[in-house]
Image (cartoon, rainbow, N blue to C red):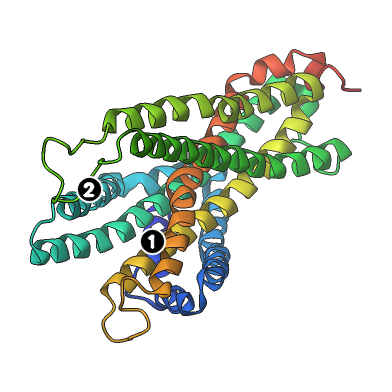
Amino acid sequence: CGTIGALLMGLVTEYHTSHAFTPVKEVADACKTGAATNLIYGLSLGYKSTIVPSLLLAFMIFYSYSLCDMYGVGLASVGYLANLATVMAMNTYGPICDNAAGIAEMAKLDATIRQKTRVLNFSGVSFAAIGKGHAIGSASLVSVALLGAFLSRVRLSNMIYISGVNTLDPLFFTFLIIGGMLPFAFSAMVMGSVAATVMDIVSEVKFQFERNPNLCAESHISSFERVKPDYLACVLVATRKSLQEMIAPTLLVVLSPLICGLFFGIIALTGMLIGCILSCIQLSLSMTNAGGAWANSKKFIERATGDDAIKSGSSNVYVASLVGDSVGDPLKDTVGPALNVMMRGMTVISLVFADVFLGVNQGRGVYGA
């Protein structure tokens, strides 16, 4: 069940992010009318791309649970990872092709070589998107299995919860809504971190140009006057800023289940975990697929030859595709994968501290009745 589901998830992701299929071509076509329509169409594609994967995940969980209870869900997650080596190879292929294309461009290699590296980079984006889609499905199944382990631990340790958690409890619904909100708060933090880091890097680049007017000058400048850019400074800015900006999102993931479990109890924590998992699945799927579609639509426009409106690299169509690609990069490379870590991290922390939560007012929390 899990292995077949992983295959189908990969095929669905490929359909939504590969230039060989209609969705990416439609996003590229939307660039003809500007960046706004490109962004609107890309967001629409991202939202649409959650439908089939969500149904697949729901079927896998329902079918595996009906066969072997939560143990079946655990087995489905193991089966989902059966082709892990292939997915890891695909994930590695993408960055290698991307770097090869960048090196070929910067080194100004022959046009035929650059064309070949562009083609490789084209497929590399699709492979990376398939790998991210696989990771989302895996994280979803693992999180559900960990949630089942948490509830099983609670039932075994306290007779109050022997029949499970009462989903009609108002505390459950309250924290179900709060849990559904947490991935959005987490995504806002991570996206804001990306924007802040980009602004710092741009400021560093502008500072270097102001300090050295001959930076990256053309060939008519003598080699004595030409100044090389300080690449290390930009790398240090990115590294330092990325570590600093990840403190707040990490604290959100770690402290949310601890505070909820200690102060409001097991019922509230269960609602929060369920809401968080549901929102994480939908958000990560939509962001990853939309970002992959924007990236490949830009590459499709670069290679287009049949349509005069999109074959010119200096046209407004290409500029619109660049805007979409710039918006899509943090979605597919930063926020989407980070949400997988969020839902797994919160369920693991809840499972590890389950006995601690049960020891506080018999699992009702400090403020529990």
Q: Please count the marks in the image.
A: 2
Residue 364 is drawn in which quadrant? top right
Q: Residues within 10 Å of mark 2 (few under 14, many from 20)?
A: few
Can you see residue 162? Answer: no
Give the structural element (helix, strand or loop) at label 2. helix
Viewer-closest of 160 and 51: 51
**Which quadrant, please, contains the C terminus?**
top right
* Residue drawn 32% across the image and 60% down it: 126
The three-letter amino acid code for the residue at tag 2 is: Asn
For disc 2, the marked residue is 99
Mark found first going from the N terminus, 2 or 1:
2
Q: Is residue 343 left or right of residue 221?
A: right
**Which quadrant, please, contains the N terminus?**
bottom left
* Residue drawn 23% across the image and 44% down it: 216
The answer to whether 80 is drawn above or below residue 163 in the figure is: below
Viewer-closest of 25 and 195: 195
Q: Residues within 10 Å of mark 1 (few under 14, many from 20)?
A: many
Residue 295: assigned label: 1
Q: How far is disc 2 from disc 1 in space, using C-alphas?
A: 15 Å
The answer to whether 289 is drawn above or below residue 134 in the figure is: below
Viewer-closest of 168 and 193: 193
The three-letter amino acid code for the residue at tag 1 is: Ala
**Residue 186 drawn at (x, y percent):** 61, 38
Q: Is residue 152 left or right of residue 115?
A: right
The answer to whether 159 is drawn above or below residue 177 in the figure is: above
Give the structural element (helix, strand or loop) at label 1. helix
